[in-house]
Image (tube, grey):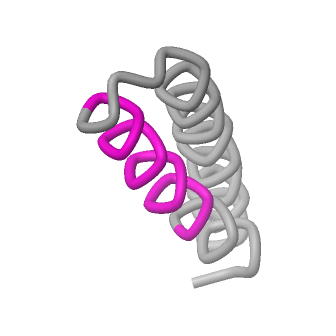
Amino acid sequence: MNKDQVKGRIEEIKGKVKEVAGKITDDKNLEIKGNIQKNIGKAQAGFGDLKNDLKKSS
């Protein structure tokens, strides 16, 4: 695993926690921020996966 994969997955988890906390507390702002953070984490992890795949194929 490279650092983009790790950081992305951590951000994804943190975003999911915020999203769920926003739903539980009925805080739409927190829920939206969590959803955005989760999706940014997914993108970063995906970028890390791509880098890893390219490194393996070289």
Percent x, y for residue 49? 57, 57
Q: Residue at x 50, y 28 (%)?
A: 35
Q: Quadrant of residue 40?
A: top right
Q: Nearer the viewer, residue 25 or 49?
A: 25
Q: Residue at x 64, y 29 (%)?
A: 33
Q: Residue at x 69, y 81 (%)?
A: 2
Q: Nearer the viewer, residue 55 or 47?
A: 47
Q: Nearer the viewer, residue 42 or 30?
A: 30
Is residue 11 shown in magenta? yes
Could you tell me what secondary structure mostly forms the magenta stretch? Answer: helix
Residue extending farthest left? 24
Is residue 13 shown in magenta? yes
Q: Quadrant of the C terminus?
A: bottom right
Is 43 rendered above or below residue 53? above
Highlighted range, magenta:
10-23
Q: Quadrant of residue 1?
A: bottom right
Percent x, y for residue 11? 61, 59
Q: Quadrant of residue 36?
A: top right
Q: Classify residue 12 as left or right of residue 54.
A: left
Q: Residue at x 39, y 54 (%)?
A: 17
Q: How many marks?
A: 0
